[in-house]
Image (spheres, rainbow, N blue to C red):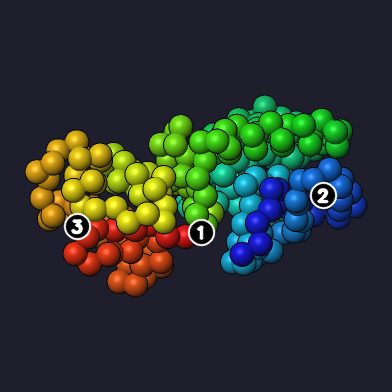
Amino acid sequence: MPEYDCLIVDDEEALSQSTCDFFNMFGLKTYWVADEKACFDFFKHSSTDLILLDINLGQSSGFQICKRLRETMNIPILFISARTSDDDVLLALNIGGDDYIQKPYSLNILMTKVKTVLKRYRGNPENIIAFGEYKLDLALEKLISSKGEINLKAMEYRLLAYLVKNKGRTISKEELFQRVWGDAITGDGTLNVHIRRLREKIEVNPNEPRFIKTIWGTGYVFED
């Protein structure tokens, strides 16, 4: 799946294309689409870490698109618009926008804002472990996919984090009991339930796991 830093959703072709070209020239991998349909078609085959979203988009509205995106995604959305009323700004921020940038904008200033938001969203690279379409943020204790944050309970997160940090190494059940639960007498049933729940949340087919694999008679190994 192609991954981009930025997706521009704007029907002003000349401005959008120049912004896209400028960003790409300075290392921000950027893609541009002109309407709502193209925006959601993009996510069928690609992903992005940030969206620049216009408000006036022909038959649809950036407000409408933002509401739909927020049903499944928590990536930063920065509105870009020539509309300047306080009502537009407040609406954009209240429905899930992270910032509101007025047109015409300076390409340099816009790029700086985008880089700043991306840095904050992605966190410290030393605290991020990526696997498949997921990013495990060890500082924020969150699991993020291309579609948004995956809701993990506290013990599910601790178990996943331990497995991921020990990727490629077979880990015994006893080690998991001691290092994750802090209890050497935790039962197999408890561990099995947590493994099953994790698989249901991150595996395409929990019955044929890609990431969390069982080593019969021993424990588990995390593979990417």
Q: Position of residue 137 (x, y in %)?
A: 47, 39
Residue 1 at least partly seen:
yes
Q: Amino acid at mark 1?
A: Gly
Q: CA distance from mark 3 to mark 1?
A: 23 Å
Q: What residue is shown with label 1?
A: 132
Element marked by disc 3: helix
Give the mark nearer the N terminus: 1 vs 2: 2
Q: Nearer the viewer, residue 223 or 143?
A: 223
**Residue at image coords 59%, 66%:** 44
Q: Amino acid at mark 2?
A: Asn
Give the mark nearer the N terminus: 2 vs 3: 2
Q: CA distance from mark 2 to mark 3?
A: 46 Å
The reply, left or right, for residue 91 in relation to residue 57 is left
Give the mark nearer the N terminus: 3 vs 1: 1
Q: Position of residue 75 (x, y in %)?
A: 57, 44
Residue 19 at least partly seen:
no
Q: Up-down: is 165 above or below 207?
A: above
The reply, left or right, for residue 107 in relation to residue 67 is right
Q: Residues within 10 Å of mark 1 (few under 14, many from 20)?
A: few
Asked if the residue at tag 3 contacts the one at tag 2, i.e. Cβ–Cβ closer than 8 Å, the answer is no
**Residue at image coords 65%, 45%:** 50
Q: What residue is shown with label 2?
A: 24
Q: What residue is shown with label 3?
A: 192
**Residue at image coords 50%, 54%:** 131
Element marked by disc 2: helix
Q: Nearer the viewer, residue 45 or 197?
A: 197
